[in-house]
Image (tube, rainbow, N blue to C red):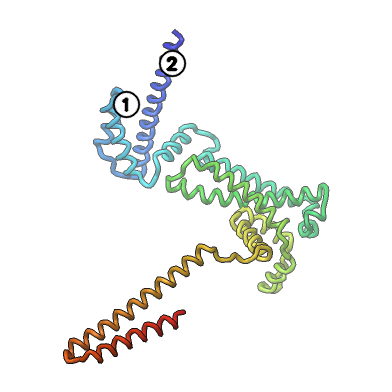
Amino acid sequence: MTKQATESAGDCEQQTMRLSAWAQLIEECHAMMAFAFRKGLQVPEGTVVMLHQLEWTDKNAAGARDLARVHNRLAELVSPAKPETIWLMAEESHKGSWLLFLGRVKLIRKMMLVAITSLIALIALSLSSYINNENMVASMFDMEGTRLLYVQAILLAAAAIGASFSALFKANTYVTAGCYDPKYESSYWVRFVVGLIAGIILTQLIPIDLQAVADATAAQNRNTEVSQAALRITMALVGGFSANLVYKILDRVVETVQSFIAPPASPAPDNNLQAQAMHTRMQSLEQLNSVSLAVMAIQQKLASDPSITAEQMQLMLSELVRALNAHQHTEQ
């Protein structure tokens, strides 16, 4: 009895999964059809009728074939937008969340809230007396306590603004095109965290002469005083926006240090053997080519002058052997 109950429970679970997959495809078809109508696309009447009939037909092989045909037609019609993206945005619109004005994709709404929070934190921290030109220029190893906490917090806020701006800009391009894939949501958050780390690395761990940067900027814009504190916050924002830039800087530093430590790589023995074998093969081909040319010259002389004597023939062969020996001595 227990075995039969287990088998029946497994069959019911598989049937539920099949029904949910069927319902999911039906919902995606409805979302794509509504999307196509809103965009002014010409949806074939037969596709609309077939989709309406599929809601009342049994889940058999014929129905599955028709459902696949309808789904494929609609997916081709709304391309390059993806069915899952269209269905996801339709579901978010049906929920009617009060945050819907921030976007119909959950990632966009979360990232917008992070960006707004970071912007508010940057403004609020800048009101503190700890945030001044002296503290912002100082290294994190020269400060302690509350002063260090405020400086690091405002740098993190600036890096968060840059990282969230980069993620929002990239994600919005996919959402606008209808190609956003929810499975890549974690990659945006990874990029955001990497941006925070890059902002701190660029402003605190990589030695940059802010005074020289400020002087160069002031030289280009005369009668303009450049704040070093603003430069450091800008560097944090740039580090958050382009973590790849910080990665390239660190990679270049590693290559430079490695060039001083590691000896130059010597060619592998196998490569030397292959080069020698190739050189020997080329010499053999050149020698064979020269012999062929000499023999052809002798044949042409015999064809043009049949009265050549045996002594003349012997002389030509001796010259050929002498030329071959000289060629071998030259190669050695």
> Above or below — where is 125 with respect to 325?
above
Q: Is residue 104 visible?
A: no
Q: Nearer the viewer, residue 26 or 132?
A: 26
Q: Nearer the viewer, mark 1 or mark 2?
A: 2
> Above or below — where is 65 with respect to 221?
above
**Residue 192, percent from left and from top:** 60, 47
Residue 9: give its label: 2
Residue 317 quadrant: bottom left
> Above or below — where is 138 with respect to 3?
below
Tag 1: amino acid: Glu
> Circle 2 sits in a helix, a strand or a loop, which is it?
helix
Residue at x 55% of width, y 49% of height: 167
In the image, taking residue 115 as reference, residue 124 lies left or right, namely: right
**Residue 46, percent from left and from top:** 24, 35
Q: Is residue 196 visible?
A: yes
Q: Can you name the residue that lies furthest to the front here?
A: 311
Q: CA distance from mark 1 to mark 2?
A: 26 Å
Residue at x 37% of width, y 40% of height: 35
Residue at x 51% of width, y 47% of height: 171
Tag 2: amino acid: Ala
Q: Nearer the viewer, residue 111 or 82?
A: 82
Residue 281 quadrant: bottom left
- Looking at the rendered structure, the number of numbered marks drawn on it comes to 2
Question: Local crowd at mark 1 within 10 Å, few (<14), some, or many (≥20)?
Answer: some
> Circle 1 sits in a helix, a strand or a loop, which is it?
loop
Residue 55: give its label: 1
**Residue 100, percent from left and from top:** 52, 38
Earlier sequence position, callout 1 versus callout 2: 2
Q: Can you name the residue that lies furthest to the left here?
A: 306
In the image, taking residue 326 as reference, residue 141 lies left or right, namely: right
